[in-house]
Image: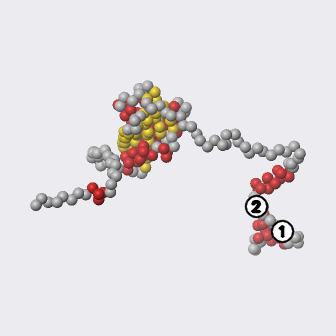
Amino acid sequence: MDPLKYIFQKPMPTGRLAKWQILLTEFDIVYVTRTAMKAQALADHLAENPVDDEYQPISTYFPDEEVNSVEVIPEDTNAWKMFFDGAVNAKGVGIGAILVSPTGQHYPATARLRFFYTNNTAEYEACIMGMNMAVDLDVEELLIMGDSDLIIRQAQGEWETRDIKLIPYRQHVEDLSKRFKSVEFRYIPRFHNELADALATLASMLPYPGNVHIDPLEIQIRERHGYCNTIEIEPDI
């Protein structure tokens, strides 16, 4: 890219390079490497388009830039919320879903898959598991949220399902949707889906040897240190 620089700076040229170096030393040539082609292009553009009397500077004012608050439209309080997610790693694949009632009560569920799966099939399995939970609880209005853009858009009907493995899943989700009075699918970022992701990751990481039963996890809330719960009983005299 810099042939003159190569000729001048080569320590021991041979052949034609040596001949060209000798010929060029007769001239007072000072070689300066161009630092940036973009800067040169900008300079050429400004030189070819000088500012005249009709020039007006660009207005940098944008309307509504003073707005610093956004009004949040409240959601229907009668609708249940369902979060779902799938986790695929080296130890296996797990799915997690959680139902949230209008009063804030949480119903988590998790499962581990032992059949052929992909990331998308795991997401569909988690969504179907959560929808089945909602059907069992006689939920009428359901808001389904997940961080898989593909699953959400296919469920909304915006994207066509072309993968043969996903077509039965898409059809089953559509059939389950008919069992609700109203159902809505909404995409959320992954950091808003942390609880479902934690459930799916937990199912994928826990070992399941054979048919060993693992009791559901119970989360306790403790407001005191563990040593504060110790009670010493004095022996009766």
The spot of residue 93 in percent (x, y) is 40, 45
Q: Residue at x 56, y 37 (%)?
A: 71
Amino acid type at mark 2: Thr
Residue that carries the numbered disc 2 in the rendered image: 35
Which residue is pictured at 54% across the width and 37% down the height? Answer: 72
- Left or right of 156: which side holds 28? right
Q: CA distance from mark 1 to mark 2?
A: 15 Å
Q: Residue furthest bottom?
A: 12
- Whether residue 164 can be seen here: no
Query: Considering depth in this image, is 210 or 184 the residue closer to the camera?
Result: 184
Q: Which label sits in the foreground, 1 or 2?
A: 2
- Circle 1 packing at 10 Å, graded few (<14), some (14-19), many (20+), is few
Most distant residue in the left direction: 237
Q: Residue furthest front?
A: 237
Q: Which residue is mark 1?
A: 30
Q: Position of residue 208 (x, y in %)?
A: 32, 48
Left or right of residue 34, residue 183 in this image:
left
Residue 98 quadrant: top left
What amino acid is at disc 1? Val
Rendered residue at 12%/59% (across/down): 236
Q: Is residue 235 visible?
A: yes
Return the residue nearer the eye: 1 or 90. Answer: 90
Left or right: residue 195 versus residue 227 is: right
User: Which of 152/125 is in front?
Assistant: 152
- Label 2: few (<14), some (14–19) or many (≥20) C-alpha neighbours in 10 Å: few
Residue shown at 41% from the left, 27% from the top: 140
Quick one: quadrant of the N terminus? bottom right
**Callout 1–callout 2 Cβ contact below 8 Å:** no
Res. 86 image quadrant: top left
Does label 1 or label 2 sit earlier along the sequence? 1
Q: Secondary structure at mark 2?
A: loop
Q: Which mark is residue 220?
A: none
